[in-house]
Image: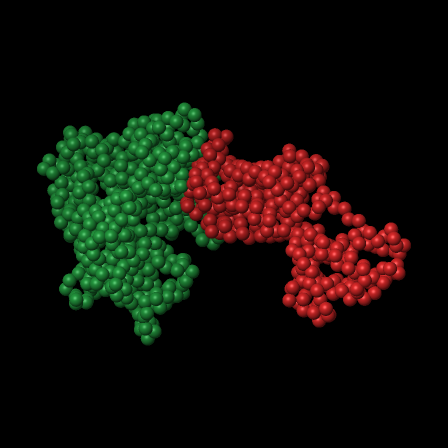
Amino acid sequence: MEVGNMDGPVATAHEVTKRFAKDGPPALDAVSIDIVAGRMTGLVGPDGAGKTTLIRLLAGLLDPDGGTVDVQNLPAVDADHAAIGYMPQRFGLYEDLSVIENLSLYANLRGLPASERDARFRELLAFTDLERFRTRLAGKLSGGMKQKLGLACAMVKAPKLLLLDEPGVGVDPVSRRELWAMVRNLAGEGIGVLWSTAYLDEAEKCDTVFLLNEGKLLYAGEPARLTGRIEGRVYRVFAGADGRRKLLERALNDKDVTDGTIQGASLRLVMKPDVGAPRPAAIGAPADCRIEATAPRFEDAFVDILGGGPPGTSALAQAYRSIPQTQEPAIVAERLTKQFGAFTAASNISFSVPRGQIFGLLGPNGAGKSTTFKMLCGLLTPTSGGGQVAGHDLRKARAEARQSLGYMAQKFSLYGDLSVQQNLNFFSGVYGLTGTRQREAIGRVVEIFHLKDYLSVNSGTMPLGFKQRLALACAVMHQPPVLFLDEPTSGVDPIVRREFWTHINGLVEHGVTVLVTTHFMDEAEYCDRIALIYRGEEIAIGTPDDLKTQAAAKAGLDDPTLEDAFITLIEESDKQREAA
Amino acid sequence: MWGRIYALIVKEMWAILRDPRARVILVVPPLVQLFVLGFATTLEVKNIDVGVYNRDSGAWSTEFVQRLAGSPNIRGLVWIRSPEELRSAIDNQRVIVAVSIDQRFSADIEAGRPATIQAVFDGRRSNAAQIVSGYIERIVGEMGASLAPASASPRSLSVLTNWFNPNLDYLWFTMPALIVIISTVSGLGITALSVARERELGTFDQLMVSPLRVHEILIGKMVPPFLVGLFNASLYLILIPFAFGVPLTGSVPLFYLALTFYLLALVGVGMLVSSLAQTQQQAFLGVFLVTVPATLLSGYASPVDNMPGWLQILAQANPPKHFLIVSEGVFLKAMPALDVLSNTWPLVIIASVTLTASAVLFRARME
């Protein structure tokens, strides 16, 4: 057998099946993929799709139950592990060691000869731009820098195959772009790169994409070919910002529409094949509204391949009480400032959210958006400044303010070792529901979120989509006028995410006010207004379209995405800081 | 407010009891500990060998040796023929004590002069040696007493009466103490994990943004370990008189009064550990850090009165120290209400200080 054949793929998996539970569904079901040198290969799918399992099989850490996994024409388990660079999810770094110590450790583990070390380290540190942080502890690096160091560690002995397990998770868009550019360079040098991701916009940029869902391979090939399938079926409807949520609801209920999202003030609709452009009358849009065809994105195609998005009407919103509307804003932040010792995590953050709107907090990791969020929901006491939630002062009436908000955290933060029923009992009870009202509230969400079959199941063992539904259920049982969502849909598949936003949009139409932090730009598009937080300061505030316009003016971009706007505005702020 | 606290208590009870294994762990290991520790920490010395270096051949020395051989605590006698042999018997731990009988022993007794017996103990086993020395002294005393009417010579005679535990049965002492020690270990463990678990799993934020006030969280988290402690202590209270035959002479309501405040103090310390810890692992190590000194300073292993002054002051802050006195007292000497109360009020202070401190830390650790 010829080893290291450069023409064939660096690694292949053929009809691989892997099961973890005997009776359960397989984690991977007859999946075949090829990783070719010099190309960016994307492994795309929601959490629990089987991405990590496949990567661990390729790294030779697991044995397949069926099928074969070969690296450089040898079974992965026997392959030359020095030729495989593996960067696990969640930083395989030692946080109590410095940058250079981490590198030395990996060099020792991988048997890099001492004579080559200095040169190699210099090269890697220059490449990842970490030279300045040589002696800093890995635990003290930002999320993006940690990923870069992780990449450097995986590269310490130039591998033939580089396996990256969700390198983009927890990394803000700016760092994500830098990391992508670095890895792209490596692929150019003839390394086979597998980049796994739940972000569908990353998938779009790969040379080849393997799309996994629930252990099955849904698509393999160039991303453009997948998006090509729905070419000519994607439209944007410009009917003004007012009433766009109602419009989306009606559009999604239309039989000719398979999928739809909000994009700033406009709607983005994917039509069923052969029905042509959406007709304003059918979706209840004004007859004179502008409708134009637009280029399909990978996510549109992904949802289409899964059979389209959920219907547009939220049963949760229909059963929700109507929140009385007043002119008084629902959430107010007044010069909120938080200092941890000498470090100012948030400085002079001010905004106000009228009732019945969605407000987004955006920003890189560690920029202060979580700190702002936590101050507003009463988890942190502001050093100075103040705020109000539903008319309750954050300093004087904390408990009342907390009673009037529903909170849903970034990670699944319900009680995983309690059953669904016990979780529902607890959260309804804690928010003051008792007796008949409690039973009714629980019955309502069980029906709306289809939780009946799971009632006695430990909530931690449910599929991610159901966890996410349960978390929302627990947050809204007491029908609060204000919802706080901290990266509510990170990791869930686009269908569940759409279902989630259908509920949120419906609730907002009933007068609920929503504060959301997010990394997903398509989530940010649902917001009425956004504050961009960077280095503890609010560097921009406005509607998504405002921010895009600002960025377009500053960087001379034509029709920028929200991510482009995000990056432009941050770079602009850096320039101003340097100039000052 | 009560609805919220009730919901939290139910949730906390489920968190402790939902796992069938966890339910077993709450009850079985403490019971096993009760039996194992009860029998393992015996303070009695049985089955000992005594060396006898008898240089007298008279009747009285034979009488003494027979009394030794007849003692239920002594397994056998080792005959020693020279001082060198005596030395090596002790050195090799063949005997814990060697008695040496003087040549003139019988003659002295006959003549009415004070007679002496020399006893050499193995000081390496000082505790056991002290106890054995007690046995030997008692045998000598008994022999002296039987001689007394016949002799006019002065003899030091003491008649020992042990109040509250006439037969000096060690179980009478260890069992009431074990109630204290075992409930300390399990009570601290459950409480310390409760907040740390939530912090580690990320559910603590969720709890803090709910309308629950800090004192409500505190109450909700205290009740389940309190109930578990109450349950275990009640189980022991029944088992100890019936299974081990230790008399329960005092007032049960008074015992429960002191137990209530003891458990509150304990839960307070546990809560303090829990609010300091960021992870369950830290909480677990924290419990370890507290339990060992708490046990040593409780008076279970060695009397607090024998400790150096500064340590005695420190022991005042140790909840088991106070409750141990009450537990022993209620079991063995029908401790009067006033004495129970005077040992309970320090527990009230410890509970209020620790619980207040953990309430403050709850919030402070969030920032």
In the image: residue B217, left or right of residue A539: right
Quarter location, residue A186: bottom left
In the image: residue B212, left or right of residue A305: right
What color is chain A drawn in?
Answer: green
**Residue that lies at the very extreme toward the left in this rendered image:** A274
Q: Residue at x 69, y 63 (%)?
A: B78
Front one among A190 and A443: A443
Quarter location, residue A528: top left
Counting every numbered tag in the picture gives 0
Q: Residue at x 21, y 63 (%)?
A: A74
Quarter location, residue A372: top left
**Residue that lies at the very extreme toward the top in this rendered image:** A436
Q: Residue at x 32, y 54 (%)?
A: A89
Q: Where is A172 relative to A426, above or below? A: below
Front one among A490 and A211: A211
Q: Residue at x 45, y 37 (%)?
A: B14
Front one among B283 and A2: A2
Q: Position of residue B142 (x, y in %)?
A: 79, 52
Asked whether residue A329 appears in the rendered view, the answer is: no
Q: Where is B343 relative to B312, above or below? A: above
Q: Position of residue B281 (x, y in %)?
A: 47, 51
What color is chain B drawn in?
Answer: red
